[in-house]
Amino acid sequence: MYDLILASSSPRRRDFLNNMGLTFIIVSPEIDENPFEGEKPYDLVVRLAHNKAFAVFTNYSKNVVLAADTIVVCDNEILGKPHDREDALNMILKLSGKTHQVYTAVCIVGPQGKEEFVTVTDVTFSHFDERLAKIYVDSGESDDKSGSYALQGIAAMLIEKVNGSVSSVVGLPACQTREALERFSIFPRTVKALK
């Protein structure tokens, strides 16, 4: 039996937990991720992480369930995952030369209770033209990413500065998540070096 369940199909979240040496299974929750009309970014990301965790915990109440959600906000507009490459290009161009916020909410629930937290990280993109934005979008990296970019990937060439948790922008605030999991008696066993 696994003590920890990751309520996410995100390969980046899976990799974070694997790199911490944690043993877990993945159960992808089915929830409506659409924002309510007028819903603020903070409220949205907290609601989604909470709903994902409890959608899985309902069927696995003897386990600890970890869920997270990440959204990108630029000029008070929530930039979700792009519908297609044209949508991705428009999102990337909105980010050019601007500082935007990345909100990541984590909800951990288990028999001993619940813990939720949110990190907000400022990411500043350099100024770039449509030609460079199109080259990036055509790489395919933006296809399934909130805000249409992956900080840990090719998009790093577009990013001037990050103020806050880098791992949170990638999908899971690693330090805070480890600390929270330890309060649920889930500890890293063998940490794997990235090579």
Image (tube, rainbow, N blue to C red):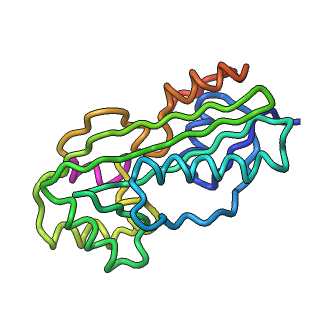
Picture quadrant where residue 123 is located = top left
Residue 195 appears in the rendering: no
Q: Is residue 177 above or below residue 120?
A: above
* Apparent side of residue 116 relative to residue 73 in the rendered image (left or right): right
In the displayed structure, 193 sits above or below 82; it is above
Residue 81 visible here: yes
Horizontal and vertical percent for residue 14?
Answer: 61, 44
Q: Is residue 158 magenta?
A: yes
Residue projecting furthest to the right = 1
Residue located at (37% from left, 36% from top): 166
Name the residue at 27% across, 41% down.
Answer: 122
Does 77 sit left or right of 61 as displayed?
left
Residue 100 on image: x %, y %: 25, 50
| Image mark count | 0
Dominant secondary-structure state across the stretch colored magenta: helix
- At which x and y percent is residue 65? 72, 40
Image quarter in which the N terminus is found: top right
In depth, the one of 17 and 40 nearer the eye is: 40
103 relative to 141, above or below: above
* Residue 53 within the segment the image draws in magenta: no
Query: In the image shown, does 15 or 105 lie closer to the viewer?
Result: 105
* Residue 189 figure quarter: top right
Question: Residue 87, image x and y in percent?
Answer: 33, 76
Between 64 and 97, which is closer to the camera in this rendering?
Answer: 64
**Most distant residue in the front direction:** 38
Query: Is the residue 60 above or below the residue 119 in the image?
Result: below
Please indicate whether residue 47 sits to the left or right of residue 139 in the image: right
In the image, what residue occupies the spot 11% across and 67% down?
A: 129
In the image, the segment drawn in magenta is: 152-159
